[in-house]
Image (cartoon, rainbow, N blue to C red):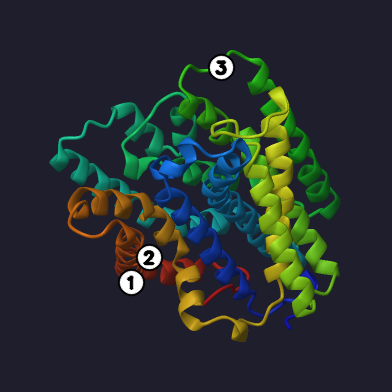
């Protein structure tokens, strides 16, 4: 088992927790399964009992929480790195931080935008100039709360929210004061719950998909997962991460069960309902689920995971970014040419091929450059 090392003891050491790469792969896999599953194609649901319909749709929806798991992981890692930096250097180098984040996110992000622009143009699929402008300035989530977009671009709302977090978070924790970080972390939970309730009491949109997006694409709704990541960063500094296998197994099962129950309250699908509080309940249960999964993985030795899983977790940014593009291309060029049951494996392989190519051709050169701005050495 690995133990979490206090920030002050990291001077001169490399901060890297490979088990979180494995968890990143799990988060991606959940998103992939969510995008490729389609309960509408299940004929038996038309005559099934209401509870079974709710359960099947919940199984479809549960993978979408992989996005919130990504948010939590990003916040946890960024918070730990920034705290280590302040503890070891007595200051936070904002310029170096923003250079690192830009070199990590921007090269592949803008390469992906250019690729999608070219494909959309060749396919003759119109994408509104408003979306391109929103994507360039990382506010695509706000654009998508009231507008649809071409399938491969639909998941860029998450990158916009992450980039907004990267801009704001180091400014708020610049002093390295752990009490400030703790208070902000708790405040994000209240902000998220209040934002959801406010959205539910304001006029709704006529299209269920857009109504759903109005909640999930809202930065103030998703902010609680960044706050939870920061709180977990503080918690992990002072507590050992070693757990027995049985406890980790129970945490993983409990986390999945919480996410499944949370999905049962998603108003977009046939679900349980507590009126205007349905999304509030969904996000509370979702938070419990992602925290439990995070704790189940935290501190597990890298030897427990196959190398391919750690590698795919390492390139999970590319896997996630190309997910819907791979789905779209298989849908366009392989439909009726391969058995339905092979579509998911083919999408996965195409997705991996895109991500591996992107990692070695686009990401890796910039990651080498990014290492020059590291104050605290992280993953190789």
Residue that numbered label 3 is attached to: 204
Is 7 in front, or is 318? 318
Classify the position of the N terminus by image quarter: bottom right
**Residue at (36% x, 56% y) in the render:** 108
Marks 2,1: beta carbons within 8 A: yes
Question: Which element type, helix, strand or loop, lies under badge 1?
Answer: helix
**Residue at (68% x, 70% y) in the render:** 297
The reply to whether residue 370 is in sight is yes
**Residue at (41% x, 61% y) in the render:** 319
How many labels were placed on the picture?
3
* Category of crowding for the residue at label 3, using alpha-carbon neighbours closer than 10 angstroms: few (below 14), some (14–19), many (at least 20): few
Residue that numbered label 2 is attached to: 363
The reply to whether residue 79 is in sight is no
| Quadrant in the picture for residue 150 | top left
Is 334 in front, or is 279? 334
- Label 2 and label 1: CA atoms lie apart by 6 Å
Residue that numbered label 1 is attached to: 360
Q: Is residue 328 left or right of residue 44?
A: left
């Amino acid at each position: 088992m690995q133990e979490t090392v206090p920030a002050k003891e990291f001077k001169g050491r490399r901060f890297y927790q490979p088990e979180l790469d494995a968890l990143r792969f799990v988060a991606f896999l959940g998103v992939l399964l969510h995008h490729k599953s389609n309960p509408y194609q299940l004929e038996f649901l038309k005559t099934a009992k209401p509870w079974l319909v709710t359960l099947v749709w919940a199984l479809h929806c549960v993978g979408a929480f992989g996005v919130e798991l990504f948010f939590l992981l990003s916040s946890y890692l960024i918070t730990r790195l920034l705290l280590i930096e302040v503890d070891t250097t007595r200051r936070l180098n904002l310029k170096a931080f923003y250079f690192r984040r830009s070199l990590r996110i921007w090269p592949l992000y803008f390469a992906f935008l250019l690729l999608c622009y070219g494909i959309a143009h060749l396919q003759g699929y119109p994408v509104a100039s408003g979306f391109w402008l929103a994507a360039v300035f990382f506010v695509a989530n706000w654009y998508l709360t009231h507008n649809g977009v071409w399938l491969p671009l639909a998941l860029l709302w998450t990158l916009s929210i992450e980039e907004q977090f990267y801009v704001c978070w180091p400014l708020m924790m610049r002093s390295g004061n752990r009490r400030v970080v703790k208070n902000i972390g708790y405040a994000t939970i209240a902000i998220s719950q209040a934002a959801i309730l406010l959205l539910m009491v304001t006029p709704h949109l006529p299209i269920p998909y857009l109504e759903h997006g109005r909640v999930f694409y809202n930065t103030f709704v998703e902010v609680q997962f960044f706050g939870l990541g920061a709180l977990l960063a503080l918690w992990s500094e002072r507590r050992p991460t070693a757990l027995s296998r049985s406890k980790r197994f129970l945490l993983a099962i409990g986390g999945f069960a919480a996410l499944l129950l949370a999905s049962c309250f998603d108003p977009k699908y046939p679900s349980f309902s507590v009126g205007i509080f349905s999304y509030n309940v969904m996000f509370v249960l979702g938070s419990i689920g992602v925290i439990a999964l995070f704790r189940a993985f935290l501190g597990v030795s890298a030897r427990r995971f196959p190398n391919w899983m750690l590698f795919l977790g390492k390139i999970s940014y590319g896997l996630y970014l190309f997910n819907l593009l791979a789905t779209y291309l298989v849908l366009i060029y392989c439909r009726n040419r391969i058995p339905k049951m092979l579509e998911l494996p083919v999408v996965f392989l195409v997705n991996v091929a895109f991500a591996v190519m992107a990692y070695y051709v686009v990401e890796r050169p910039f990651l080498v450059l990014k290492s020059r701005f590291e104050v605290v050495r992280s993953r190789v």
